[in-house]
Amino acid sequence: MEDIRRIAYETVLRACGFGSLAIFCVMIGMSFEPRLAFQAGGFLTLLMTVILILKAYEARRKDHRHTELWLYLPKERRPAKVDAQWAVSTAMRETYFQFARWTAIISIVMWIIALFFSLIGL
């Protein structure tokens, strides 16, 4: 189960990394207006949070054999067919929710920074 959790963490981390890179690029493009940049970053990070929550709910129904996790899991480490669906969906669900919590916190911080810039008149 530890291999499944580790691979789930790595796959979701990579996906969130690409999403964060896109959000960072948008924010850099708006860096001439810091308040607007952090508002856009907060909104896009909140959108990432919503997507992660939706993916967590979808994880229960998604066939485990069609997940990236299953492809990266070595064949000798794969659980029996009876337990595989439960193990993969549980690991993916927990990982999606964990990353959703983190991105929600990041979104809140970005909105607070945008509010700060708004209050000081930038």
Image (cartoon, rainbow, N blue to C red):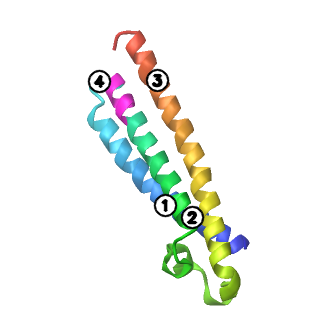
Please tell me which residue is depicted at 52% across the width and 81% down the height of the picture: 71
Name the residue carrying label 4: 33
Disc 3 and disc 1: Cα gap in Å? 26 Å
Q: Position of 7 compared to 46: left or right? A: right
Disc 1 and disc 4: Cα gap in Å? 29 Å
Question: What residue type is disc 1 on?
Answer: Arg
Name the residue carrying label 3: 113
Point out residue 75 in the picture as x, y percentages from the top left corner. 62, 89
Answer with mark 2 or mark 4, whichever residue precedes in sequence. Answer: 2
Question: What residue type is disc 2 on?
Answer: Glu
Point out residue 62 in the picture as x, y percentages from the top left corner. 51, 72
Point out residue 54 in the picture as x, y percentages from the top left corner. 49, 55
Q: Is residue 32 magenta?
A: no
Name the residue carrying label 2: 10
Above or below 96: residue 63: below
Disc 3 and disc 2: Cα gap in Å? 29 Å
Circle 2 SS class? helix
Answer with mark 3 or mark 1, whichever residue precedes in sequence. Answer: 1
Name the residue carrying label 1: 14
Kindly indicate whether the residue at mark 2 contacts the one at mark 1 (C-beta within 8 angstroms): yes
Decide: few, some or many residues near mark 4? Use Cα within 10 Å; few <14, some 14-19, many ≥20. Answer: few
Please tell me which residue is depicted at 26% across the width and 26% down the height of the picture: 32
Answer with mark 3 or mark 2, whichever residue precedes in sequence. Answer: 2
| Residues in magenta, as a range | 35-40
Decide: few, some or many residues near mark 1? Use Cα within 10 Å; few <14, some 14-19, many ≥20. Answer: few
Question: What residue type is disc 3 on?
Answer: Ile
Answer with mark 3 or mark 4, whichever residue precedes in sequence. Answer: 4
